[in-house]
Amino acid sequence: MPASIFDAFRDFSQYARTFYGWRTIRRPGMGVDFRADEYREQAKRMVEALHPARMRLRVIRVIQEAPSTKTFRLVRVDGPLPPFRAGQYINLYVDFQGVLTSRPFSISSPPGRDYLDLTARGLKRGFVSPYLAANIHVGDSLDASGPAGSFYHEPLIDGDDLVFLAGGSGITPFMSMIREQAEKGWPLQIALLYGSRDPHDVIFADELAELAKTTPRFRYCLQISDPPKNWRGPKGFLDAALLRNEIGAPDGKTFYLCGPNAMYDFCLPELAKFGAPRHKIKRELYGPPADVARHVGWPAHLSPTAEFQVRVGDRVIPAIAGEPLINSLERHGIVVPAVCRSGECSACRTKLIEGRVYMPPTAGVREADRQFGYIHACVAFPLTDLVVAV
């Protein structure tokens, strides 16, 4: 493993020079076998440095961002940190009471640092986030995937006039983007519309307020859905009226959404009312639906508490209809590779041999996988007894 990412690039540069040198001096009919060990090893080092499958991280600082939320500052201890794009995430692997599971967390620090910040809200209805908030301290180590995800700014497609709609902990990928722009000198125009329940539990509240005061190219509106009696700021939800009031018209803008699934159900129709073109709306997938029985296509007669049997090899385990299949597998010690846990990345691609499952329309299953019986276990909900191969 190279000592730094720069060593990896140097290795790759040497590989390129060697390649072009061979190509230049070779005689007609004389090929170059790039399967040779020297080339394979250089390419392998480069790929491992840029796209590590696993990283070992150590907590060097814990920051209390809000009453319910902590940021964990992490450094890598088994190699250099790979590059990432502001808005991407990593997947943390944890052993929670004997259950091996994982959850993705957006990186809230900007690219280019020698550490990664992960910000987690420890709400009781969560699973891994409350575990991190209660049990992880400075000096502890965690396993993670390399950076992943496609929720980031594409200059040629998205332009430079951006509107961010964040709900709750959905602010985290936006903080990475906003902090990166602050370091670059704000080449982009950004309007952040941030929805929160409680004005006293707003993540990054002070930093956002200060940026709004000092940065002409950054506009910030905090919208409180359950305001106390003394709250004098904007109230309600991120709707078309708020968009018209804060940003005027949708012309030339690209809209980014990140927050709970219920937020998308509300905001997407409101963006349509506002006149935002569908192709100018980008959304970060935010886990499986909290109540899958409310989604279009769920069988009306089936209770989400119904229990089925799932056969995996020579084992049979119980699975609840309203819970993602991957959760049931993990609970019984059957670990399925996973990264996004939102139906997008296909890391948990699983063969469905018998039975039927429900997958939300947002599940990014390739058509070829559908034809040959593959599902994404992280967003597959049992509708019958199943036989699967993992």
Image (cartoon, rainbow, N blue to C red):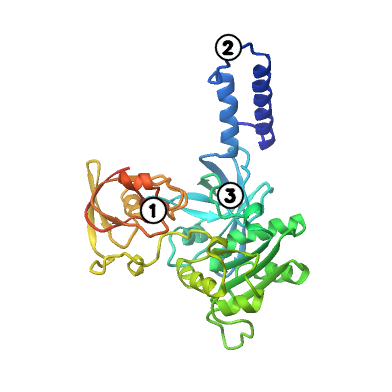
Q: Quadrant of residue 171?
A: bottom right
Q: Residue 37, relative to residue 79: is it above or below?
A: above
Instruction: Tell me the quarter of the image containing the N terminus.
Output: top right
In the shown orientation, is residue 186 left or right of residue 263? right
Question: Label 2, on which residue?
Answer: 29
Question: Which badge, 2 or 1, comes first in the chain's sequence?
Answer: 2
Residue 11 position, x and y percent, is 66, 28
Residue 265 position, x and y percent, is 45, 70
Which SS class for mark 2? loop
Crowd around label 1: few <14 · some 14–19 · many ≥20 (10 Å): many
**What residue type is disc 2 on?**
Gly
**What residue type is disc 1 on?**
Cys
Question: Is mark 1 in CB contact (under 8 Å) with mark 3?
Answer: no
**What residue type is disc 3 on?**
Gly
Mark closer to the observer (2, 1): 2
Question: Label 3, on which residue?
Answer: 139
Question: Which badge, 1 or 3, comes first in the chain's sequence?
Answer: 3
Q: Residue 308, relative to residue 243: is it above or below?
A: above
Residue 332 position, x and y percent, is 31, 50
Question: Which badge, 3 or 2, comes first in the chain's sequence?
Answer: 2
Q: Which numbered tag is attached to residue 320?
A: none
Query: Which residue corresponds to the image point at 58% horizontal and 12% vertical from the top-left?
Result: 30
In the shown orientation, is residue 3 left or right of residue 336? right
Q: Marks 2/1: CA distance?
A: 51 Å
Q: Marks 3/2: CA distance?
A: 58 Å
Question: Label 1, on which residue?
Answer: 378
Q: Residue 20, relative to residue 311: is it above or below?
A: above
Query: Which residue corresponds to the image point at 41% horizontal and 55% vertical from the top-left?
Result: 363
Q: Quadrant of residue 246?
A: bottom right
112 vs 188, nearest the viewer: 188
389 vs 133, nearest the viewer: 389
